[in-house]
Amino acid sequence: MYLSTFKPLFDFFSALFFLLIVMPIVLFITIYLSIYYFGNPFFLQKRIGKNGNIFTIYKFKTIDSKNEISSFSAFLRKYKFDELPQLFNVLKGEMSVVGPRPDLPGYYDLLKGKNRKILKLKPGLTGYASIVFFNEEYLLNQVTDPVKYNDEIIFPKKIKLNLWYFNHISFMLDLKIIFKTLILPFKKN
């Protein structure tokens, strides 16, 4: 009942409310990055959505043409401000506030058996696995082969965490995940 009826409404109105609150920040970042990148401040990428459908995710651009990250971009990434444009993905119905993070083709779309249950969910701005792997970028920077580490260690754990979420989904669980997501960047490491 929650998943099919209330969650889509919760997603839409939460995203709209949050977007209205953060709109000055979104505008500032958009203008700043437009100047810094001499044009488009957004990073667009194809991701796997609900039922394995492909959609375009919106993020703020944080890597320049030399593959470098400025201190401002590092700040955006650390506090997840680069993800704010995904509120528009939620408003469009492509994403949820809480759910498995959308991944590139070649991961969720290739799941088999019971693991494919994850594809019944819209990808989320945050999720249970997002909290557990909040420092994923740091972890990947510590290994010699980040792709292998992701494929063999992180992604299988994310599947288990996302299946757990799928089997326990509720309004209260979503609220807990949202709350933990909001405070996580401000906790000392």
Image: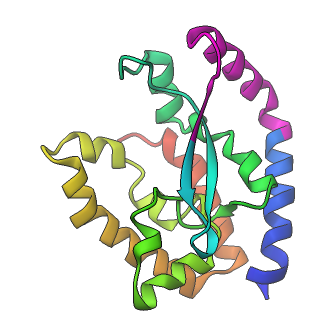
Q: Nearer the viewer, residue 138 or 87?
A: 87
**Residue appearing at x 60%, y 65% in the figure:** 49
Q: Is residue 116 left or right of residue 178?
A: left
Q: Position of residue 29 (x, y in %)?
A: 67, 21
Q: Position of residue 31 (x, y in %)?
A: 71, 15
Q: Is residue 61 above or below residue 139?
A: above
Q: Position of residue 162 (x, y in %)?
A: 48, 74
**Residue appearing at x 55%, y 39% in the figure:** 80
**Residue appearing at x 51%, y 39% in the figure:** 186
Magenta run includes residue 41: yes
Q: Is residue 97 left or right of residue 162?
A: right
Q: Nearer the viewer, residue 113 or 178?
A: 113
Q: Position of residue 23 (x, y in %)?
A: 81, 31
Most frequent secondary structure within the magenta stretch: helix
Count of picture labels: 0
What stretch of residues is rendered in magenta? 20-44
Res 174 → quadrant: bottom right
